[in-house]
Image (spheres, grey):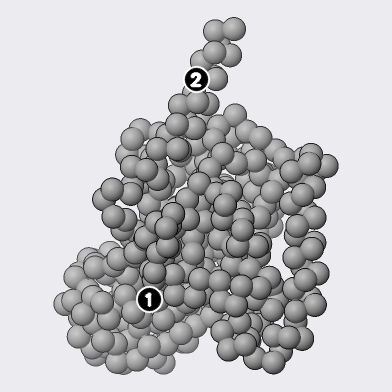
């Protein structure tokens, strides 16, 4: 099936499920038996790894997994970007692994370079590579991606963009990102609800990070902030507030979140167009939306797919994670401790 058709089908299913989850539609009751079956299967899979019936692959450096309990994007990729930059600033050698959702390569694992396209690796890995230049490997089985990185790179820590439910990947730190607006919708497993795992799974993770919305005891507040836009063609940077006549597009899981960010930045788009998550773009699709005298602002995730056929009036808005000042140190501390522990083990083995 062509990639555009796969994306359209996936998006249609997602829209139907979102309606069921949020509106308690009568189909919700019809889906409950399937949810019970899904919950039983996932519980058995996790139990099999915990009991050692299935192999958990461990690596000689710490693995940090940033994931979520629900279907859809909650802001994991910006958080991964924030974390790897913080670790890099402290002098640590960091690698990133991803499943590469939305991409399809001729072989796996693939190591990203300047010739890799989003069609091969997916939107998020390419975004992360363009922002950081760090070693990034993509594979449906993340253990293969980690192994590929370690064969070619000397690293101190690997961060997995998503992968909370990929139990074969041994990990030292787990962060879960929650959408503060919707949280867990109706609280049921897929497909009657959005949960991949039970909410009690939160008791086993090192950090619960809430992207917008209310924060409960034990959770950390996170906000995505964008103030400067970048031109796709020239790389010119301008303040978001300097724009007046704009059209906004977003092909992400929650496009209203992007439009809200624009409003917070003092910009009210003339038109807001929401595309499907991982949308496959063609130049004519966007040309018909924007008049010559208007500017177009899109998400950074969309920009990586539109770079090749961009126009002079096309811009994207990078967003960055902001935490309360007293939180950053407590988030990073367990990861740094894990890195020091692994370094200590290496030093001891060398001396022996």
Instruction: Tell which of 174 and 349 is nearer to you.
Output: 174
Residue 350, can we see it?
Answer: yes
Q: Is residue 144 left or right of residue 277?
A: right
The answer to whether any part of residue 11 appears in the image is no
Going 29% across and 67% down the picture, which residue do you hit? 226
Q: Nearer the viewer, residue 205 or 263?
A: 205
From the image, tell me which residue sits under label 2: 344
Q: Is residue 52 left or right of residue 143?
A: right
Query: Are there few (<14), some (14-19), or many (20+) residues within 10 Å of tag 1?
Result: many
Numbered circle sitting on residue 45? none
Is tag 2's residue or tag 1's residue first in the polypeptide sequence? 1
Q: Position of residue 188 (x, y in %)?
A: 66, 73
**Relative to residue 304, is residue 318 drawn left or right?**
left
Q: CA distance from mark 2 to mark 1?
A: 43 Å
In this rendering, the answer to whether 24 lies above or below 169 is below
> Looking at the figure, which quarter contains the N terminus?
bottom right
Picture quadrant of residue 322 = bottom left
Q: Position of residue 80 (x, y in %)?
A: 45, 53
Q: Secondary structure at mark 1?
A: helix
Hey, which quadrant is residue 272 in on the image? Answer: bottom left
- Say if 63 sits above or below 40 in the image: above
The residue lying furthest to the left in this view is: 242
The residue that mark 1 highlights is: 258
Q: Residue at x 77, y 86 (%)?
A: 30
Residue shown at the point (66%, 55%) measured from the top left: 165
The residue that appears at 41% across and 92% down in the rendered structure is 288
222 to 63, vertically: above or below: below
- In percent of width and height, residue 197 lies at 66, 62
**64, 318: nearer the viewer:** 64
Q: Nearer the viewer's eye, disc 2 or disc 1?
A: 2
């Amino acid at each position: 099936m062509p990639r555009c058709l796969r994306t359209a089908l996936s998006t249609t299913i997602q829209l139907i499920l979102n309606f069921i989850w949020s509106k308690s539609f009568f189909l919700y009751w019809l889906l409950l038996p399937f949810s019970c079956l899904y919950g039983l299967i996932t519980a058995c899979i996790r139990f099999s790894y915990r009991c050692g019936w299935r192999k958990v692959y461990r690596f000689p450096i710490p693995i940090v997994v940033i994931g979520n309990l629900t279907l859809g994007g909650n802001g994991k990729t910006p958080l991964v970007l924030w974390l790897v930059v913080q670790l890099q600033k402290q002098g640590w050698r960091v690698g990133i692994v991803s499943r590469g959702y939305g991409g399809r390569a001729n072989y796996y694992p693939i190591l990203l370079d300047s010739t890799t396209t989003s069609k091969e690796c997916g939107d998020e890995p390419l975004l992360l590579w363009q922002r950081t230049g760090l070693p990034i490997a993509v594979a449906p089985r993340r253990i293969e991606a980690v192994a590929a990185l370690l064969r070619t790179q000397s690293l101190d820590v690997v961060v997995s963009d998503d992968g909370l439910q990929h139990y074969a990947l041994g990990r030292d730190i787990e962060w879960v990102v929650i959408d503060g607006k919707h949280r867990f919708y109706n609280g049921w497993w897929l497909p009657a609800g959005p949960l991949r795992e039970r909410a009690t799974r939160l008791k086993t993770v090192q950090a619960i990070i809430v992207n917008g919305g209310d924060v409960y005891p034990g959770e950390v507040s996170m906000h995505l902030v964008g103030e400067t836009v970048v031109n796709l063609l020239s790389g010119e940077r301008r303040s978001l507030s300097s724009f007046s006549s704009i059209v906004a597009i977003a092909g992400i899981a929650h496009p209203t979140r992007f439009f809200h960010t624009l409003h917070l930045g003092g910009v009210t788009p003339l038109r807001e167009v929401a595309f499907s998550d991982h949308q496959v773009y063609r130049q004519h699709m966007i040309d018909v939306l924007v008049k010559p005298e208007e500017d177009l602002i899109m998400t950074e995730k969309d920009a990586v797919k539109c770079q090749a056929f961009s126009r002079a009036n096309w811009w994207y808005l990078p967003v960055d994670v902001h935490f309360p000042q007293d939180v950053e140190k407590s988030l990073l501390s367990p990861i740094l401790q894990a890195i020091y522990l692994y370094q200590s083990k290496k030093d001891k083995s060398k001396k022996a």
